[in-house]
Image (spheres, rainbow, N blue to C red):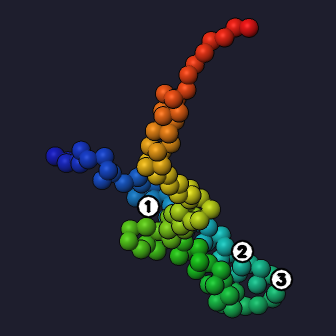
Amino acid sequence: MDMEFSRDIETFKSRGFKGISWNALFFGGLTVLTASAVIGFCTYYLHLPVLVGVYICVPFAFPIVQLGFSKKNGYTKMEILQRKRMTSGYCKKKLHYSSTERKLERREDYEKAKSGRKTKNTAG
C-alpha cells in the first residue's frame, strides 16, 4: 500500500479532533453552550415551552456561528475583524516626510561656515 504525502509544509492543515479544526470545535462548542443556556433560562425561569426557547436562542447563537464558520475570501469573520483592528487608525504609524534637498542645503551651509571660521587655540 503506497501513501503519498505532500512535501509542501504550507499545504498541511492542522486538524483538531477527528478531522475537525480547533477553530470549528471551539466555536461549535461555544454555540452549543450559548444555545443551551438560553433554552435553559427560558424553560426554567420564564416557564416557556422548550420550542419557544429554541426560537429565542437562535439570535444569540447565530452571531457565534457566523464568527467561527463563515468565510469570505478564505478568511473567517474573526480573522477579518482581527485584521481590521490591526490596520485601524490607532495602530498605524504616522507618516514622516523629510526632504533630502533641505538636508543637503543645511550641510552645505554648515560646511561653508566651518571652512570660513578660523580656529585659534589661545591659552590664556
Dot 3, how many residues are within 10 Å of its Cα: few (below 14), some (14-19), or many (20+)? Answer: few
Residue to which mark 1 is pinned: 20
The answer to the question of whether label 2 and label 1 lie on touching residues, with beta carbons closer than 8 A, is no
Residue to which mark 2 is pinned: 37
Residue at horizontal 71%, vertical 79%? 38
Residue at horizontal 50%, vertical 42%? 106
The answer to the question of whether label 3 and label 1 lie on touching residues, with beta carbons closer than 8 A, is no
What is the three-letter code of the residue carrying label 2? Ala
Q: Can residue 10 be seen from the camera position used here?
A: yes
Question: N-terminal of the two: label 2 or label 1?
Answer: 1
* Residue occupying the far left of the picture: 2
Name which quarter of the figure residue 89 lies in.
bottom right
What is the three-letter code of the residue carrying label 1? Ile
Q: Position of residue 52 (x, y in %)?
A: 69, 91
What is the three-letter code of the residue carrying label 3? Tyr
Question: N-terminal of the two: label 3 or label 2?
Answer: 2
Judged from the image, the secondary structure of the residue bearing numbered disc 1 is: loop
- Image position of 3 (left or right of 70): left
Residue to which mark 3 is pinned: 45
- Image position of 100 (left or right of 47): left
Q: Position of residue 72 (x, y in %)?
A: 42, 74
Judged from the image, the secondary structure of the residue bearing numbered disc 2 is: helix
Residue nearer the viewer, 3 or 115? 115
User: Where is the C terminus found, in terms of image quarters?
Assistant: top right
The answer to the question of whether label 3 and label 2 lie on touching residues, with beta carbons closer than 8 A, is no
Cα–Cα gap, marks 2 and 1: 24 Å
